[in-house]
Image (cartoon, grey):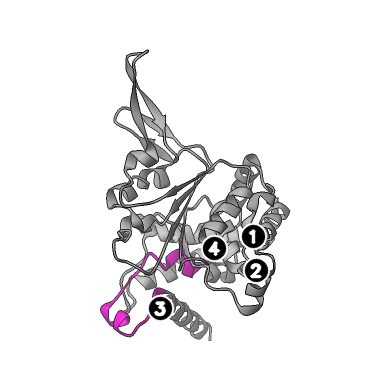
Amino acid sequence: MQGKVKLLIDNLNDVIIGKKEVIENVVIALISNGHLLIEDVPGVGKTTLAKALAKSLDLTYRRVQFTPDLTPSDIIGVSIYDKNSGSFVFKKGPIFCNIFLADEINRTSPKTQSSLLQAMEEFEVSTESNSFLLEKPFLVLATQNPIEYQGTFPLPEAQLDRFFMKISIGYPNKDDEKKILKSYLDFKNLDKLKPILTKSELLSISSEVENVIVHDEILDYILDIVNMTRKYKSITLGASPRASIDILKASKAKAYISNRDYVIHDDVKSVVIPVLRHRIVLSAEARLEKKDADQILKELIQKLYIGVQYAKK
């Protein structure tokens, strides 16, 4: 099945030019059954990436534009009175799909944002009288704009922690942007994309990822990184145990797409930043020094590496 995953990555690379690492992280989240937060400026391809992923998979897809007047029932669904039966019938909302795109999630109220929590964590939706299981695979792709904060509702830490990874696409370099200009009509018309993976194949791949071997040395390395975030001087809120699990899952998926059945240290290092960048809170001093989460995590990993090398001597 690893060959199929490579085809999926190649398919997405044909749409999002020059962003191989971003595409790999999207696929890592997909095969790890994790949810993605995509934060970037307008026009770099956030929604296009989500649509291209949906087109590349034989899965149901729904997109909701999050606005200030959106209500939880607009996402989950609503009970409607059926005069024929004399009872209320639940009409399912767009959340009942395999891939759910929450476009500009920070534009809607915290009440509506929180309606996603149960679905993301438990793969279940509860109403006043019933609970409904969501069909697997289920992936939430949420986008948000890091600028123009006026009128937005930043996601609270509890909800941010539900996202497996936070990624940013960024601007393309000049050569890649030239390719985009030459074939922008092809990028605009995503109907040409064909499904690469079926639902059963994707579920099978996720099972294979879970069986990737992880030695105790790698587990200790993951725990050292997470524990260091909890006592590092530039961080006031460190990573949670859920973050430890997600680093492990992401490392397994990284090994899998690298055609290995075991995890190495480089797998862990490559996924730490996208898995942790939204889960730590920086100190006031770090913010005054204009540092961001990525810089702090790079510092932390480097210091941990130097410490390990010194201990081996």
Amino acid type assigned to the residue bearing label 4 in the image: Gly
Q: Residue at x 28, y 48 (%)?
A: 111
Q: Position of residue 122 (x, y in %)?
A: 41, 42
Please, what secondary structure does the residue beneath circle 3 have?
helix
In the picture, measured across the screen, residue 220 lies left or right of residue 267, that is left
In the picture, measured across the screen, residue 131 lies left or right of residue 56, that is left
82 or 154: which is nearer to us?
Answer: 82
Q: Position of residue 243 (x, y in %)?
A: 42, 60
Please, what secondary structure does the residue beneath circle 1 have?
helix
Pointer 4 residue:
45
Please, what secondary structure does the residue beneath circle 4 have?
loop
Amino acid type assigned to the residue bearing label 1 in the image: Phe
**Between marks 3 and 2, how big is the CA–CA gap?**
33 Å
Which of the labelled discs sits on residue 180, or is there none?
2
Asked which quadrant contains residue 290, the reply is bottom left
Pointer 1 residue:
187
Residue 145 belongs to magenta span: no
Disc with the residue nearer the chain's start (3 vs 4):
4
Residue 27 visible in the current orientation: yes
